Every structure is written in structure tokens, then in C-alpha cells.
Amino acid sequence: MNNAAVVTGEFNRVVKFFWQELKPRGKWLTPFNVISIPIILIGLVILYFRFVYGIGSVTNLNQYYPLGIWIGFDVVTGVALAGGAYVITFVVYVMRMDKYHSIVRVTVLNGLLAYIFYAGALTLDLGRPWHIINPIIGNSFGYNSVLFLVSWHFLLYMLTMALEFSPVVAEWAQLEKARKFLAGLTLGAVIFGITLSILHQSGLGALFLMAKPKIHPLWYSEFIPVMFFVSSIYAGLSMIIFEGTISHKVFKDLLGGHDHRRYEEIVLGLGKGAAITMFVYYFFQALIFIHEKRWQLITDAWGYWYLVEIIGFVLVPCFMYAYAVRNRNLGIIKVASVMALLGIVLNRLNVTVIAYRWYDLNKYYPSWQEVVVTLMVVFTEIWIFRWIVTRMPVFEKK
Amino acid sequence: MDRRQFFATSATVGAAVLNIKKAKADNAGQSKEFVGVLVDTTRCIGCRSCEVACSTVNSNFVPDVKNDKALEKVRDTSEMQYTVVNRFNTEKGEVFVKRQCMHCWQAACVAMCLVNAMFKTKEGPVTWNGDKCLGCRFCMVACPFDIPKAEYRSWNPRIMKCTMCYERLQEGKRPACVEACPTDTLMFGQKRELMEIARHRVYSHPDKYVHHIYGEHEAGGTGWLYLSAVPFEQLGFRVDLGTTPYPEYTKNFLVSVPLVLFGVPALLLGLSELTDRKKEVGESQEWTNE
């Protein structure tokens, strides 16, 4: 009886605590709010039309372009950019490099939210989203399907990241016993998460292996899965640098007592990692290019477009990273990270949308509704991110 | 259980687990041969009876064949029509070609589908099951012939494609289009028989036909086969699809999955043990060899 009373009291405390934490804090009329609120509202209206009148009523998708930016950007690109979580957990928990410990929490949070929102955006694109439970509950498994594998890995990886982040939530809710228990599971979760990441990052590329006659030969090779995996490493690292830069401006006061020198060391380390993986990626691309004798393919507009991606947004930022690390120049690293991210966006969109059915005269381009919904997904994610970091101990205050 | 028995048992179980799919596939192969349809484009007069019959049987849009002048431009199958007949002006004059799902022997759409909504039946037709489908439309990405079509304007979209009248086949009937064809352009049967007939026609009239049966090897072989008097690229066929069955393209990736799934955690656990400082012996112990 006494126990029951304690539990009820604790329960009431937690409910009250959540209720207080739900209230907004800070100023309302910030530039970000002014832009994002209308876009989110318009996005909701568009989604109403999408679910009532069909996907065709708001998108430019057609029988020859079944995938648009909701898949090509939100899902395929979004997941690549969220690769930072598995890279950093590898570095910190497996390689035990303590230098990066202070950015683990925020990176995992970013990864978790990115997966929830960008992989979640998948449900907006599904024609019959209520059947999404079919591959999970075993309403006939397509074992031989890459898509089956990718969808399961998405799901499991989201759970894994939630587990990795759960100690922070427990700390916030002041549940010390739960925190200790959850923290004990971290290494297992991390190892499982890295494995899943390797498989689904490459699996996203493997989805397009059967589209061989439809993707321009410069972007198609049997190594798409490997390329997707390798590029997700530097995509993740670049995203951490990019997000870190913004967080440092926006959440300055949350980072109290912050040691600038330590931050600089972290960014330089990440930049070095990005430079090396980018060079490996470039080298792979070059090998494929030479091995498949693609010289005659780069003489037309598609060839130039390919060179823009590979030289302009892979090789150039790679050298910029290397130069900046050597000269300890954080400014150039930040520019390089943005360029590397653009290169990832270009590459994923080329495979899924731009160089897909390159021979088609009626090319797909996104409708304004598709763009608004994409922005809505991004902004909503930022809202949730902001809500969490202003309440939970995400940024380390040591 | 002694050791030997244990190994024998685990080997049997392991073999059973790994080979279940293979065994199933073998059984399916033995019980029945895949069926298909042979299309002799030299016989087609472009009457489009097949279009009407198909749409009637499947409750799709029935074209007004006499008045719609649809042959004036090249059409594709759509979410409203599983099959269309097109007219091509070739070096040997007008040729009519029927287009529909090819019912590949190893279909890309089936291999892509994560819930077996696209399904290769043991009789040969590739069918679609709306109770399973998520509407992800990756079957449309995978299909080398661009056959599956989505109903974009519906809150509950279906994937529309020819099913070779699977339900009629179950009743012992032939596909509606074959039934409706007045000129014997379409011939229904098992692929082996159809190939013999097709080869016989090509060999006995070498001047009339090109020496190629479209669908014999394309994309690993298809259920529907085409004979033609002119090269197939003049009839709107893609001739660059290769002869590899499309599911083969993802095979290497799928084979490497268990390797990663078990190899990587082992490697990472080992690494994490090696890097654990707490377990280091004698931090203070100094190395003397320089």
C-alpha cells in the first residue's frame, strides 16, 4: 500500500513535470518562427489534400517518375546526412576517443530526429501508408527484397538510437535508476546501430540497382551501395560540423563555460576525418570511371553535370578540408562542410531524380507543394530539436 | 546428446534454414511450367479487340475503338488500361504491336516488393495484391518495361497492370485478350511450347521474320514472346535491357548482408575490448625497448 502511494506520488510528479516542460520558453517572434510557422501550416493543408485526393493532387509525380523529392531528398538524402550518429558513436564508444565525447549526445539526438522525420516522411509518400505494418507484422515477408531489409533496418536503428539517447531523457526526468540501467545498454546499442547503419546506408543505394536501364550510366554502377555507404561517412561528419556551427551561434547560452580551444580541436578532427573519407570516395569514383571506360560519356551536358558533382563538390571540398586542417582554419572548414553537404544532395538527387530516366523528354521537377512539405518536415524537426536541447542536458556543460 | 549427434543435428537444422527457399523454388518448378503468350506482330491488324476485351474483363476504361483515333499516336498502358495496341511505320510498312506486362520469369517488381504484393504465381502470371501493397511504387522503379502504373488521383491508390487474367486461368480459361483476338496473333500456352512454335515460324519463313524472338532472353526471359518482321527497336521495344534476370543485380548485395550483420558486431566488440583503457595492464609499467 505504501509502495502504491510512492508510485502514484512519483507518477504525479512526472506528469506535472512534463506538463511544465511542454510550455514554450523564450521569445516568440524570432525570424525562424516567423518563416517556419506559416510554412508548417500551409504544409498541413497540403497534406490534407494529399491524403484525401491522392498524391497526384499535390505532386508532379507521374507514371515514369514514381519517386520525387519526398523520397529523393527527404528520405535518401536525409538519411545520408544523418550518418553522423553512427560515425561518432563508433569513434567514442568503440574507439574510445574521449575528445569527441562532448558532441555525442547532440549528434545522436540529431540522428534520431532526422530518422524520425526524414524516414518518417516516407509515410507521406506511400500510397497506402496504413499498410506500413505489413512488412513488420509478417503479412508475408519479401525476404529477397532490398526494400524489406532497408525498412526493417530503419525501424531497428530508430529504436537503437532512441536507446542511445534514453539516458539523457532519464536524466532530464530525474529517474536516476532508469538512467543507470539505460546507460549500461549503450555499448550494445552502439554496436548494433553501426551494423544496421552500414547495411541500410548501402541498402538505400542497392534499391536502385535494378533501375539499371533508367539511371544515366555515369551514376549507375554495381557499386552504388558501397558508394552510398562511404559517402554517408563524410556526409555525417560534414553535417556535425555544419550543425555545430549553427548551434554555437543559436544556443550560445546553453553551452556556458565553453572551452573554445576544445571545440576547435573537435572540428579540426572531424574535418580531417571528412577529408580522408572524401578522398577515398573520390578514388572509388575515379576507379569506376576508368574501369568502365567512361571517357566518351563526359563530352555532353550530362558529363559536365557529373564533373560538377565529382570535381566541384567532392574533390574541391576534400582539398579545402585538408588545407584547412593543416592551417587550423575553421572558416574554410565550415565552407568545405557546406560544399560537401551540397555534393551529397546533388549525388542523391542525381541517382533518384535528375539522372533517373535522363532520356525522358518530360522531366520531373517538384511542384511547389512538394517543396513546401519538404520544408515543413525540416522545420518541424528543428522545432522539436530546439524544444529538446533547451530542456534536456544535451550540450555538455563541463 | 553426444557431440557427433549435436553436430549432425545442427548441420541439418542449418541446412534446412538456409535452403528452405531453394527447396520451395525447386518444388514450384517441378509442379508446373510457366505459361505465357506468343505475339506474332506480322498477323496483327490493329483491330484493338484485345484492348476492349481486357478492359471489359478487368472493369477498366473501355476505349471507343471505332472513333477515338488512338492509333495516331504511340500510347502506353496506363492506370486505366492494362494493354494498348500501337501502330509503327517501319521499313516494311505499318506494324501493330500490343503492349502489356511481360510477366518476366524472374520479375524485378517481385524482387523489389517488400511484402510480396507483387507476386509471381506458380503458374507464371505476375499478380498484385492490394491488401499487402504499401504503395511505395518501387516496383515502378524496378520494372525495366515501365509497366506498373499507379492511381495517383486516389486516396487509396492501386498499382495497375496486366495479370494475364490470372482468375480466368484458374477457371481453365485463356486470357481475355487471347480469346478476343480474331487473327491468331496471340497464342496462349506454356513457354516451352510457344518457343517451339515461334522458332518453327522463324525457321520456315526466314525472309518474313527477323531472327530474334523478343522475350526469349530479354531481362532473363519473359512470359510474353514477340515475333516480328522488322528489328524490334523499330517497334518501340527497348533492346538494351540485357539478358540478366533483374533480381540478379541485387544478389551480391543481399549475399553480403549476413556477412556484415554478424562480422561487423564481432569486429566492433573486439575493437572496443582492445581500446578499453580500464582493462589495460600496468599503466605505470614502462616499456624499456625503444
Image: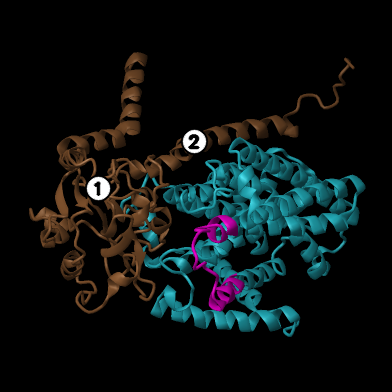
Q: Report the residue marked by disc 2.
A: B256
Question: Horizontally, is A29 left or right of A109 in the view?
Answer: right
Q: What residue type is labelled 2?
A: Ser
Percent x, y for residue A218? 59, 48
Confirm whether the magenta stretch covers residue B174.
Answer: no
Q: Which amino acid does label 1 sit on?
A: Leu
Q: Report the residue marked by disc 1.
A: B225
Percent x, y for residue A345? 64, 59
**Which mark sits nearer the N-terminus, 1 or 2?**
1
The structure residue drawn at horizontal position 46% and vertical position 81%, both measured from the top left corner, is: A48
Q: In which quarter of the image is residue A108?
A: bottom right
Percent x, y for residue A138? 34, 52
Q: In which quarter of the image is residue A53?
A: bottom left
Q: Which chain is cyan?
A: A
Asked which secondary structure carries label 2, the reply is helix
Cα gap from disc 1 to disc 2, whole angstroms: 35 Å
| Chain B drawing hue | brown
Chain of the residue displaying label 2: B
Query: Observer-nearest residue: A60 or A37?
Result: A60
Range of magenta residues: A349-377
Percent x, y for residue B112? 39, 50
Asked which secondary structure carries label 1, the reply is strand
Asked if badge 1 and badge 2 are on a common chain, one would say: yes
